[in-house]
Amino acid sequence: MSRFQALTNSVLDAELEMLRERLGLEPNQNADLLREVAALAGWVVRQAEQGRAIEARRGEEVEPLVHPAIERLRARRQKPMGERLRPSDAETIRLASVLDQGFAPPPALREALANLANPKRCPPKLRWKKPAV
């Protein structure tokens, strides 16, 4: 089980504390808080990626969810893939000069690549660690 640590400031600490209380979690349930917030954020991102608007409604009052991350998702969705990958003239010239130099990998990299390409090579068996209780 991986561990997650983050440096926070007082504003973020207060926001997380407020969320923990509103979600009915105890102070020692930080992993549960992260799981809940990640699930909610994941849902929001998936909706935005599908082009859906996220709104809060109360009667006739409607408030759309506005955030820079959602705007980035919408902008990325509106641009065709080829347009995002279209390099400028300067980038194209730089790429051509790098590619013209050829590639001479160091001996260690050559050995590692040769090992990966070896048809007799067997990848290691995966073993799952059981979480400590």
Image (cartoon, helix red, strand yellow):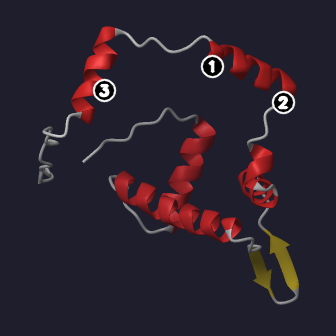
In this orientation, which residue lies closer to the viewer: 97 or 81?
A: 97
CA gap, disc 1 and disc 3 = 20 Å
Residue 105 lies in quadrant: top left
Q: How crowded is mark 3: few (under 14 residues within 10 Å), some or many (20 or more)?
A: few
> Where 56 falls versus 35 (above or below)?
below
48, above or below 117, in the image: below
Q: Is 22 left or right of 59, judged from the image as shown?
A: left
| Number of residues whose C-alpha sits closer than 10 Å to that of mark 1, classed few (under 14), some (14–19) or many (20 or more) | few
Q: Which amino acid does label 3 sit on?
A: Leu
Q: Name the residue under label 2.
A: 88
The mark lying in front, picked from 1 and 2, is 1
Note whether 43 is above or below 14 in the view shown: below
Single out the mark in the foreground, 3 or 2.
3
Name the amino acid, label 1.
Answer: Leu
Front residue of 71/66: it is: 71
Task: Label 1, secondary structure: give it.
Answer: helix
Residue 75 or residue 63, whichever sits in front: 75
Q: What element carries label 3?
A: helix
Quarter the C terminus occupies: bottom left
Dot 2, how many residues are within 10 Å of its Cα: few (below 14), some (14-19), or many (20+)?
A: few
Is residue 9 or residue 81 the one in the foreground?
A: 81
The residue singled out by tag 3 in the image is 113
Q: Which of marks 1 and 3 is nearer the N terminus?
A: 1
Residue named by callout 1: 99
Q: Distance between the residues labelled 1 and 2?
A: 16 Å
Marks 3 and 2, the one that precedes in the sequence: 2
Give the residue type at disc 2: Ser
Q: Is mark 2 on a helix, strand or loop?
A: loop
Cα–Cα span, label 3 and label 2: 32 Å
